[in-house]
Image (spheres, rainbow, N blue to C red):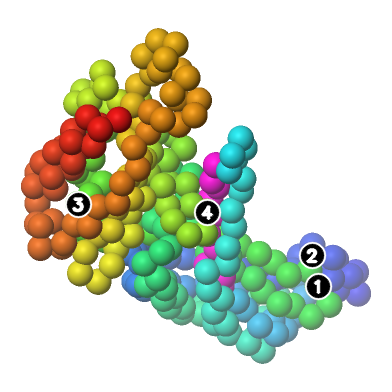
Amino acid sequence: MLEKFFARIGIGSAMADLEIPKPETELGGVLEGTVRIKGGSVEQEIEKMYITLVLKSSYFDGSQTRPYSQNISIVKVAENVVVKPGQEEVVPISIEVPSNRHLPVSRGVTRYYLRTSLDIRHAPDPVDHDEIKIVPGKYLKTLLDSMAFLGFQEQADTGQYNGRYQQFKYKPTALFARELDEIRVYPICHEQELLLGMVIDKKDEGIIGSILHGIQLDEKSLNIKIPYGEMNSVSRVADLLKEIIKKEYEKI
């Protein structure tokens, strides 16, 4: 009797443990694994078990940083499972990650989690959190590798996502180190080309530079379309970006 009471308040209740052997994939990929349901001190019925793909990020809005959270997808993987005391049930799972090209990848402040929830009658719902990694696809990876090839270093707050686009924030370390303060890029992968928004921020120079920075006249915004046929090597994309950045910097 006492054991049933404790189970109802979450002590000695059934628990879930998600196991994903390979916890990373591209957008549109599939994550395979199992959920181990471990029985508690009394027999319990799990009415439903859900796995939710959760996105956590943040973005800069005016003068402050705001958190961002979104449930990307929810999958029901089991229902009406009776677990006896000490028993272990193993449920295979397959989670398909949406292929939405506007979703971000795991980078900097942007992270993904799988939240496993057990819906148990007359008891608190146990929850298990497991981080997974959404890696860049071929063309986005080529772009990011090209920025690194040019000596641009990603900042700690890179990867910000506001629900519409993801920002990658860079500091020059060699090339353009004297001319630029930072570069921000906003890539979106379309079917045949990479659409790249870019903001070039010129380095402040004296009082005039500080004034221009305050009214954002030291920045240059541009949009670039790079056909996938021109993205067959990191060095080629790096050369293209180098020429574009140099040309646009001179207009500031």
The foreground one among 90 and 245 is 245
Going by the numbered disc 4, the residue's amino acid type is Asn
Q: Main secondary structure of the magenta part?
A: strand
The x, y position of residue 43, in whole percent, is: 75, 80
The residue pinned by badge 4 equals: 162
Q: Residue at x 62, y 37 (%)?
A: 64
Q: Which contiguous range is marked in magenta?
A: 51-60
Q: Residue at x 41, y 64 (%)?
A: 102
The foreground one among 153 and 11 is 153
Residues packed near mark 3 inside 10 Å, few (<14), some (14 to 19) or many (20 plus) = many
Name the secondary structure under disc 3.
helix
Which label lies toward us, 2 or 4? 4
The residue pinned by badge 3 equals: 142
**Which one is earlier in the sequence, the residue at label 3 or at label 1?**
1
Write down the quadrant of residue 203 in the picture.
top left
The x, y position of residue 220, in whole percent, is: 34, 37
The foreground one among 120 and 186 is 186
Which label lies toward us, 4 or 1? 4
The residue pinned by badge 1 equals: 123
Residues packed near mark 1 inside 10 Å, few (<14), some (14 to 19) or many (20 plus) = some
Which label lies toward us, 3 or 2? 3
The residue pinned by badge 2 equals: 10
Q: CA distance from mark 4 to mark 3?
A: 23 Å
Going by the numbered disc 2, the residue's amino acid type is Gly
Residues packed near mark 4 inside 10 Å, few (<14), some (14 to 19) or many (20 plus) = some
Any part of residue 173 in sight: no
Q: CA distance from mark 3 to mark 2?
A: 48 Å
Any part of residue 6 in sight: yes
Going by the numbered disc 3, the residue's amino acid type is Thr
Which label lies toward us, 4 or 3? 4
**Which one is earlier in the sequence, the residue at label 2 or at label 1?**
2
